Structures are given as C-alpha cells and as structure tokens.
C-alpha cells in the first residue's frame, strides 16, 4: 500500500501532520507496538499519544482493506470485459468502501431479477429508448419487441419489461445511491410505536411507545433501547423520510424531458426502482450505519470505564484476607501474603445462628492473629454487607482498630474461578476458594488480578450484549494492554496473563517466561530475558522498558528507562561525578543535568525529559493512593435506604444516560445525567469516572423494581421523586412530519 498517497487525506481526517503519520506507519511496519511507539519513539512521531497512534493504525488498516477490495473489483470487471477508462478512474478515485461498492453494484454477479429476465427477452434496446427520451411513440416503439415465444405477448408487456431494466439502472446508479444515502442519513426519522396488540403489563419501553428522533441525532443508548424493544416484540420500528428530493435527483440524473412522450414511462420506472429496489437497500445501509455508530459510542463508554477500573488505586504489597460471602455454604476466607501468595483458607458460617456466629468469629480471629493482614477484603455479592459488618464487629472485639475492612467488587470473580487460568494456578482448590483469592488480590492490585478475566465479564458500560462483540473485544483488549504498560509489570512475580498484555509479549511467550523463571529462578536483570527461548532482540526491544526487576543490582532495571538508554544515563552519572546508584532518585543532582548536552540523532528533548523524570522517581506507580470506601454500617440492603439520605458511594459504571453508584447495598443506584451536577451535563464521563467517590442523596426507592434514584446536585432540597428525564420526547433535530404524517414506505406518496 502506498502510504505516501494517503497522507494528505489521513492528515486532514485525523488532524495529524503527514510527517507524523508517515513516521507511525513506518514504526508499525517494523513491528513496533503502540505502547512502545508512544513511550519510546517520541522524537520520531512528535509526541503523539496512544489514542492518536491507534487511530492512525486503524485508518491504515481500513485503507489496506480498501485497496485489496479495489483490486478485486477491478479484476472482476476486467474479466467481464466491461472496464472503461472512465469507470477505472472513478474506481481509483473512491475513498470509501461504500462509494466503491456503489460503483461495483451494476457489475456484481447477482441472482436472476426482473431486469435480468427482461434482458433475456431482448428488451434492453427498448430500455435504451426510455433513457434516450426521443419523440417516438412508446407503444409503437414497443411493437417490434412483442414475441409470445419470449413471454412478451403485447406492447404493454414489452414496456413493463423495459421499465424493470430502467428501474434497476436507476437503483444501481452510484450518484443516485450516494444522494439517497446522504439524504436518508440527514433527514430520516427513526420512529418507534408500541406493538399491536400492546403488552398487557407495564414494560421498560413505555417512553418509546410513541417516539421519533432524527437518525442523525439519536444517541447510542436510545438506539439500543429501541432496537431491544423491537427484538422483544414490544416496539415496532420504522424509518421515515420525505423521499421527493431523491426522486427529483434520479429524474435529473437520467435527464427527464417533460416534452418527451417517454417522460411518463421514465418517471414510472424511476419511482419503481426507488420504491422496490433502492429504498430497502438504503434503509439497510442506514440501519448498518446507525448500528456501527452506536457500537462505536457504546464501546468507547466501555473502554473509558474499564480504563478507570483497571487503574484503581491498589492497596499494594501488604498481606490481606479475602472473604467470599455466602449464606448456606458459608464464607470462604483465604490468607494471602504481601505478594498475593495463597497461604491458607477457612470456611465460617456467621449467618447460621448464634452459636455458628460465635464459632465463625473465633475462626476469623485465629486467621487474623496468625496472618496479621493489613486489610480484609469482603466481596460485595450476596450477604456481602452483612459479612462486612460481622468482620468489623469481630475486629472490634479483638481490639483491632488498624486492620481495614474493604468492600470489593465481585464482578467477574466467578468467571475467573472456573477459568483455565484459575485451574492452572490452584488446581487443588475449590471454586469458591479461588473466588476468595481473587477478591483479596483485587484489593492488593486490581490491575494484576482483573487482567485474568475477560473484560466483558467485568460488567462495565451499557448494552454489552447488543454491541459488536468483535469490536468490543478488540477495544477492551487495547485498553488492558495500555493500562498494563502504563503501570509497568514486576517481572519476577507477574502471572502469565499479566505478562501476556506487556508490549511485544503474547500468550505463548508469557508462558515460556514463567516456565523459565520457575526453572532457573528469579531474573537478576532485564538482559536475562534474552535467555528465554523464543524471545529475540525485537521482542526485547518492545517489552523491556515496561518490565521491572525490583531486586536488580542495576537501579535502572527498577525504572521505565529503556535498556537502550542505559549507556546514556551512565554518561550522565559520570558527568555528575556520581555512581549510578547515587544519581537515581537524587533530585538535587538531576536538577543540575543539562539535557541539551545529550541530544543526538535519535535522542531529543522529549526522550531526555522522560528519562530525567524517571530518574527522579524510578518505577513510580501512576495510580492514586488507596483510600477505603466509607459505607454507612446501618445501610446494608435496599430496604434500609430512605429518600433524603445522604450517602457516600463509589461510581461503578458510567453510561451515556448517567452513572451507577455503589452505596453499600446489593443494588447500585442511578444518578441520571440531569442529576450529576448543578449545571447542564452533556456527557456524564466529563463529570465522573469509574472508581470515583461521590456523595449522593437518595431521591426515590422503588422496592418493587429494586431501583434506587440518586442525585449529586447540591441545589436540591430534601428527597422526593426525581425530576423526569430532560430529553425531549421528539429528538431535538427531528422535524415534525408534514400534515397527514408519513407512510411507513417513504415512496408511497410518489
């Protein structure tokens, strides 16, 4: 693919200079990963971030596929002997897949149609007369084509067959299709109505029983809600549009002459082609475009939520006890050392009567006294809040005021417990014990533990099962890789799933690294990685900077300084008159370094700034400092929640319509977008992020539907029912239909 030819268009589309795009394309072609390019090749591309680099990669992949399709189409038309110079020029000029397919449509092999059967009956010359718009009488011109043996019994049948051919030509004309697609996209209205007969019981789709909104303006969450209502048989959905301009464009394109005797025939053919052939195709295109747009918006919400979830503040390397709450089967408790190593487990039954509660307290006291945890992580599932309260009371009886008790999300823990990864880690442990280990480790390091779980199982975002699963998986995987490489990975303790996400390392190589570590012991320095079978110089280049070895004698192995810059840093230390060990972390000495002295062909100000920042705080964790959530102990279940209560919660999910907040009960409450702030909020993600602490007030509790409505606004007085959604019943850009309304078929009035 000729990247140079694409640079002007890509630069305009992405608002990135051609030089930067060319540099990124070259690095990608050389096998470099996005995290590596963003972190260690800033001079080459001019300090682009990961999002910009990923956008370049995506567009390059799109154009590569476009070029492949262009070649296939040209080859097909050449084989048919129908390629003209004008057609070839038009195909080569196409910049989108849609435009390319529109040009190819008349030449695409297709099943037999009314038009193809008319051609078989020899009626194509008569169709050409339609388009010539001459002065001969249509009936007289059709007479020579009458042939009962070819199923053309009279002139009317001949004209009808010719109209079928013209209708297909109109519907397959690239210019007409392009105009129609653009018109439908800009002026189409998505209409939702309640099914007939309507549901007997109330449904969650009642706001869409009489609803319409502009195709161009409808947000992803409303689109998905309407389509789900249609799938469940509650709603009927249609696309409505004033189609007169499309017909006018078609007649203009095919040079209708009102004075010609053929004018009515051409108009009839055009109307038929638009109604029967073009409209269904364009409606399908618009539906696909709407779905793709909604997918993209929803996936971005997933990605942003996952990013903040993975980058939650870790408790750090401190021993913990993990508790997986249970009622009938008891609470599974596990002790983990500071590195997350499993030590022992116990099962307690605090909810099965007074004697069982006493025995459970004694067992928990023994575990705490023996393992001395810094914190006890309690899963937030069934009986989670009750178990958390029991643990706090037990610690108070012990006189323990230092051990933290923290509620930890269980989302995806059961998926991990039954996974191959968990079976490999703990082949002899029960599923529930594995779940308790996961809960404890999530508190120590959320990122290291959550990477073992399919991101889709964590449950952030909106309409997870309605979006493109391929797009979702790809995007979420990008986020996981980005977060892992941003934080860095301790080489000697990282699990294979965590190593898999490191730049340049895949699943097979991650397993080999762990196997080598188990066989030969801990890695003493980064260079030892080159001894791992299958890990060559290119892979080492891509991964080394993101791996840490805390026990290495070389202090740079504990930092994000890439091994390719070790010699440069040693030069800095020599110039400063200090051993390398005394330079690292020495703010005063680093402040005296003049970075311009070390600039070269491949090392510029950007890289030197990163190196000096890293030398000041080697191996620093970019995540925030851990602070435990402060849930009210008297609020454990939805029945304890009352309108007017002020509570502290943790944001668990941010969607296009608001934020869900864990206030310490089994159901997350919803802060609608209109309740997130005193001022107008268009995008909830601009106000709150997953993992944020949020002080909220309870507006309403719907026990029947198990729903809690919350507000974060400070200009409200007391509780009460929330204000209704501020979104209009009709989309803001949706014009009202003309008097009398639209037919479901946009061409019915033509």
Image (cartoon, rainbow, N blue to C red):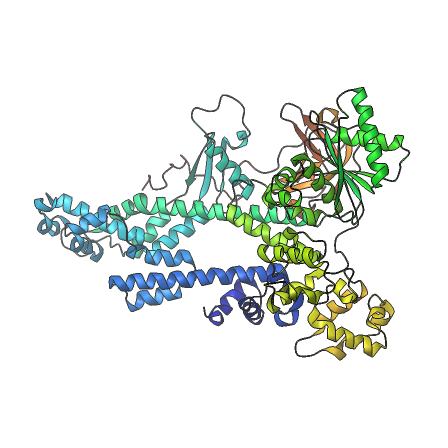
Q: Using the rendered image of the protein, determine whether residue 692 is visible from the camera's viewpoint.
A: no
Q: How many tags in the picture? A: 0
Please name whichever residue, 637 or 394, is drawn nearer the observer in this view of the structure: 394
| Residue with the most extreme front position | 519
Q: Where's residue 195, x and y in %?
A: 44, 28
Q: Nearer the viewer, residue 745 or 359?
A: 359
Farthest-out residue, right: 399
* Residue 648, position as x, y percentages in the image: 77, 37
Foreground pick, 377 / 262: 377
Please report the residue visible at 74 percent of the width from the left and 27 percent of the height from the top: 641
Left or right, residue 117 beside residue 409: left
Rendered view: 666 above or below 458 = above
Q: Above or below — where is 216 with respect to 3?
A: above
Residue 77 in the image: x percent, y percent?
A: 29, 62
The quadrant where residue 541 appears:
bottom right
Residue 578 as seen in the image, left or right of residue 138 = right
Relative to residue 670, is residue 367 drawn left or right?
A: right
Quadrant where the N terminus lies?
A: bottom left
x, y (%) of residue 350?
A: 77, 26
| Residue 608, quarter of the rendered image | bottom right
**Which residue occupies 69% across, 31% down?**
666
Q: Quadrant of the C terminus?
A: top left
Is there any visible trace of residue 281 in the rendered image? yes
The residue lying toward the viewer, choosing from 742 and 615, is 615
Task: Decide if residue 362 is on the left or right side of residue 280.
Answer: right
């Amino acid at each position: 693919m000729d990247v140079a030819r694409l640079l002007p268009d890509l630069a305009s589309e992405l608002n990135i200079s051609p030089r930067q795009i060319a540099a990124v394309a070259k690095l990608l072609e050389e096998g470099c990963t996005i995290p590596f390019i963003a972190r260690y090749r800033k001079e080459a591309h001019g300090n682009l971030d990961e999002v910009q680099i990923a956008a370049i990669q995506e567009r390059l992949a799109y154009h590569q596929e476009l070029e492949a399709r262009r070649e296939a189409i040209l080859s097909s038309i050449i084989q048919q002997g129908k390629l003209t110079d004008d057609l070839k020029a038009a195909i080569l000029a196409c910049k989108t897949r849609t435009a390319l397919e529109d040009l190819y449509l008349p030449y695409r092999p297709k099943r037999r149609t009314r038009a193809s059967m008319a051609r078989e009956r020899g009626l194509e010359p008569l169709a050409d007369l339609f388009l010539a718009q001459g002065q001969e009488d249509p009936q007289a011109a059709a007479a020579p084509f009458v042939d009962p043996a070819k199923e053309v019994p009279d002139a009317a049948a001949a004209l009808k067959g010719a109209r079928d051919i013209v209708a297909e030509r109109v519907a397959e004309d690239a210019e007409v299709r392009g105009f129609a697609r653009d018109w439908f996209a800009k002026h189409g209205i998505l209409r939702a109505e309640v099914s007939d007969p309507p549901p007997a019981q109330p449904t969650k789709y009642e706001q869409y029983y009489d609803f319409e909104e502009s195709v161009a303006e409808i947000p992803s969450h409303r689109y998905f809600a309407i389509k789900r209502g249609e799938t469940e048989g509650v709603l009927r959905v249609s696309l409505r549009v004033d189609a007169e301009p499309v017909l006018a464009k078609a007649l203009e394109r095919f040079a209708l002459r009102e004075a010609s005797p053929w004018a009515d025939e051409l108009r009839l053919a055009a109307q038929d082609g638009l109604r029967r052939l073009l409209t269904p195709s364009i409606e399908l295109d618009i539906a696909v475009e709407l779905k793709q747009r909604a997918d993209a918006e929803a996936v971005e919400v997933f990605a942003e939520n996952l990013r903040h979830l993975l980058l939650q503040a870790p408790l750090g390397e401190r021993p913990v006890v993990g508790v997986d709450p249970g009622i009938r089967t008891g609470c599974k408790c596990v002790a983990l050392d500071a590195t997350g190593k499993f030590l022992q487990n116990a099962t307690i039954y605090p909810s099965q009567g007074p004697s069982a509660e006493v025995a459970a307290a004694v067992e928990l006291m023994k575990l705490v006294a023996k393992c001395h945890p810094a914190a006890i992580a309690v899963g937030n599932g069934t009986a989670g809040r009750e178990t958390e309260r029991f643990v706090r009371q037990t610690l108070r009886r012990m006189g323990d005021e230092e051990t933290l008790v923290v509620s930890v999300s269980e989302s995806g823990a059961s998926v991990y417990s039954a996974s191959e990864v968990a079976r490999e880690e703990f082949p002899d442990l029960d599923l529930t014990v594995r779940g308790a280990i996961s809960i404890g480790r999530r508190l120590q390091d959320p990122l290291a533990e959550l990477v073992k779980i399919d991101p889709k199982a964590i449950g952030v975002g909106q309409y997870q099962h309605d979006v493109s699963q391929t797009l979702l998986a790809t995007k979420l995987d990008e986020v996981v890789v980005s977060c892992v490489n941003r934080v860095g990975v301790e080489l000697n303790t990282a699990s294979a799933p965590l190593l898999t996400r490191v730049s340049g390392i895949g699943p097979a190589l991650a397993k080999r690294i762990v196997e080598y570590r188990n066989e030969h012991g801990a890695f003493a320095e980064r260079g030892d990685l080159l001894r791992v079978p299958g890990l060559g110089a290119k892979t080492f280049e891509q991964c080394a900077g993101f791996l840490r070895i805390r026990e290495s004698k070389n202090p740079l192995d504990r930092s994000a300084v890439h091994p390719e810059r070790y010699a440069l840093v040693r030069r800095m230390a020599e110039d400063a008159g200090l051993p390398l060990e005394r330079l690292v972390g020495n703010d005063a000495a680093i402040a005296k370094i003049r970075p311009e002295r070390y600039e070269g062909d491949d090392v510029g100000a950007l890289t030197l700034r990163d190196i000096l920042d890293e030398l000041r705080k080697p191996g620093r964790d970019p995540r925030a400092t851990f602070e435990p959530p402060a849930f009210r102990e008297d609020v454990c279940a939805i029945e304890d929640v009352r309108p007017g209560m002020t509570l502290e919660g943790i944001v668990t999910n941010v969607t296009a319509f608001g934020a869900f907040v864990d206030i310490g009960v089994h159901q997350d409450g919803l802060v609608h977008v209109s309740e997130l702030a005193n001022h107008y909020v268009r995008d909830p993600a601009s106000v709150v992020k997953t993992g944020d602490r949020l002080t909220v007030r309870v507006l309403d509790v719907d026990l029947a539907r198990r729903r809690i409505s919350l507000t974060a606004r400070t200009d409200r007085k007391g509780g009460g029912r929330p204000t209704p959604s501020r979104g209009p019943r009709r989309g803001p850009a949706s014009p009202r239909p003309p008097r009398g309304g639209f037919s479901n078929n946009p061409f019915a009035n033509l």
